[in-house]
Amino acid sequence: MDVFLNTFFVLLGALFSVLNPIGAIPFFVGLTQDYNKAERSRVSLLAAINVCIILLISFFVGEYVLSFFGITISALRIAGGILIASSGFGLLNANPKKRKGISKEVEEDLQSRTSIALTPLAMPMLAGPGSISLLIAFNQDHKTTPEILSSTLAIFVVSLLIFLVLRSAHYLAKYLGASGIVAISRIVGFLTVAIGIQYIISAVLSIIRGI
């Protein structure tokens, strides 16, 4: 039970920090400002489901993708650590007009889309390279049945949290205000940078031990 709970809370905290649904609030509000309450709820649910599917595929199939391309876990951890830390630095220097992975062309195209649940909300706004690489690396170190079950539960729970945050986005944006959202994003950003650096340190130590 201790292993189950420890794995669950570690992955849940890491995923929530990297996905940062709080930071997505102003973008969700902007993209759905012309939607009614039912449409916003539907988009929130679809985005959460899409994120859940992407994360589950990354956790269970990512290892085989690495094998196919001949990528070592140490290389993945370093690349993932850089991406995660970079994402964290982006949150620390939050600009409400910019978002990771969203180009100007995509932003302009959003106006003509009938659904935003998959792109850009689920990917890359929420489930980006950082969370995908984090899950692939996490799977390498957590192979027992309790750890796999707790990791799967953590993915479901973080997806549920994403749904609740997005569904309440318009209320949270009104309550927190722009400064409140930026403050929370920067706190989460600091934690995200720490997670990324820890991944890089773990990879370097693993390489040194193997020499």
Image: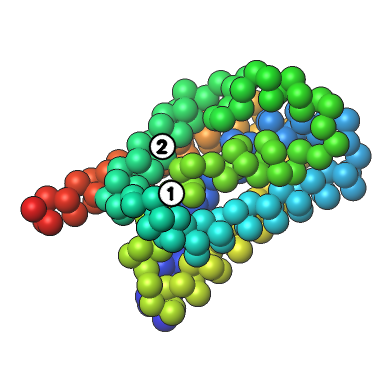
Q: Are marks 1 and 2 in contact (CB under 8 Å)?
A: yes
At x 69%, y 25%, the residue is 106
Give above or below for 69 relative to 32: below
Residue 95 at x, y percent in the picture: 56, 21
The Cα–Cα distance between marks 1 and 2, rounded to whole angstroms, is 9 Å
Residue 1 at x, y percent in the picture: 42, 81
Q: How is the image coloured?
A: rainbow
Residue 140 at x, y percent in the picture: 35, 63
Q: Quadrant of residue 116?
A: top right
Q: Quadrant of residue 64?
A: bottom left
Q: Report the side of 117 relative to 187 (left or right).
A: right
Residue 2 at x, y percent in the picture: 38, 77
Q: Is residue 161 visible?
A: no
Query: Dot 1: what SS?
Result: helix
At x 42%, y 60%, the residue is 63
Q: Quadrant of residue 153?
A: bottom right
Q: Residues within 10 Å of mark 2 (few under 14, many from 20)?
A: many
Query: Dot 2: what SS?
Result: helix
Query: Which amino acid, mark 2?
Result: Leu
Front position in the image: 170 or 48: 48
Q: Which residue is mark 2?
A: 83
At x 61%, y 27%, the residue is 102
Give above or below for 70 relative to 173: below
The label number, if any, that marks residue 133 in the structure image: 1
Q: Is residue 178 visible?
A: yes
Query: Which amino acid, mark 1?
Result: Ser
The label number, if any, that marks residue 159 in the structure image: none
At x 19%, y 46%, the residue is 204
